[in-house]
Image (spheres, rainbow, N blue to C red):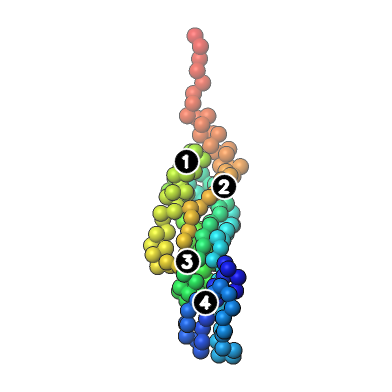
Amino acid sequence: MQQYERGVIFVLGRLIGAKGPGIFLVPPFISRITKVDLRIVTLTIAPQEVITRDNVTVKVTAVIYFYVVDPAAAITNVVSFLQATTQIGQTTLRNVLGQSELDELLAQRNKINRVSYRLPTNWRKQQQSLVHSPLLYNCATCKRSRKSLLRKTRRSFSPCRLI
């Protein structure tokens, strides 16, 4: 095992624990070892189309940073902690951005990142083996949304007449 890896060992299906780094003996044929990387993992969330609170469709991509704290819990509590982290990131992204308006989304990125960090707290209490950082996102409005925004702003501002 490398310095940044741990091996979670199961003997006859029973968890023995996490070992490493270095060399250690694992009984052959009756045991199974799973390597877990303890370095920071970067996951890119697939582009999501989100409807904001002011009914504007926005295409958003995001990145999640996390690392494993307890390798044994990460392997035994969740079938695939990478996939679970991606799914909770997508859900959190949709929830947070759906509650904000487009202006807020574009102008107050740090505030939304702080909210998105606090949102999956219940999930984080159950899954104490992972530590997450806030979502960092990139936002692009769709052409249709841009046209509707332009129409909206044109209607709200009446032209001034000079007399």
- Which residue was labeled with disc 1? 108
Q: Is residue 47 left or right of residue 122?
A: right
Q: CA distance from mark 4 to mark 2?
A: 39 Å
Marks 2/3: CA distance?
A: 28 Å
Which residue corresponds to the image point at 58% horizontal and 44% vertical from the top-left?
Answer: 140
In the image, taking residue 59 as reference, residue 117 lies left or right, namely: left
Q: Residue at 57% of width from left, 39% of height from top?
A: 146
Task: Count residues near mark 1 (Cα–Cα under 10 Å), then give few for <14, some for 14-19, many for 20+.
Answer: few
* Side of 123 where 21 appears, left or right: right
Q: Secondary structure at mark 3?
A: loop
**Callout in the foreground (4, 2):** 4
Look at the numbered discs 2 and 1 and tell me whether their residues touch, using CB distance below 8 Å: no
Closer to the chain start, of discs 4 and 2, is 4
Residue drawn 59% across and 54% down?
A: 47
Q: Which residue is mark 2?
A: 138
Q: Position of residue 58 (x, y in %)?
A: 54, 47
Residue at (59, 78) in percent of width and height = 23
In this orientation, does residue 53 appear?
A: no
Which residue corresponds to mark 4? 19
The CA distance from mark 2 to mark 1 is: 12 Å
Query: As rendered, which of 59 and 24 lies closer to the eye?
Result: 24
Q: Is residue 95 above or below residue 146?
A: below
CA distance for labels 4 and 3? 14 Å
Give percent across and percent down for residue 19: 52, 76
Which circle's residue, 4 or 3, is located before the other in the chain?
4
Relative depth, front residue between 130 and 126: 130
Can you tell which quarter of the image residue 38 is in? bottom right
- Residue that mark 3 sits on: 69
Mark 4 or 3: the one toward you: 4
- Kind of element beneath mark 1: loop
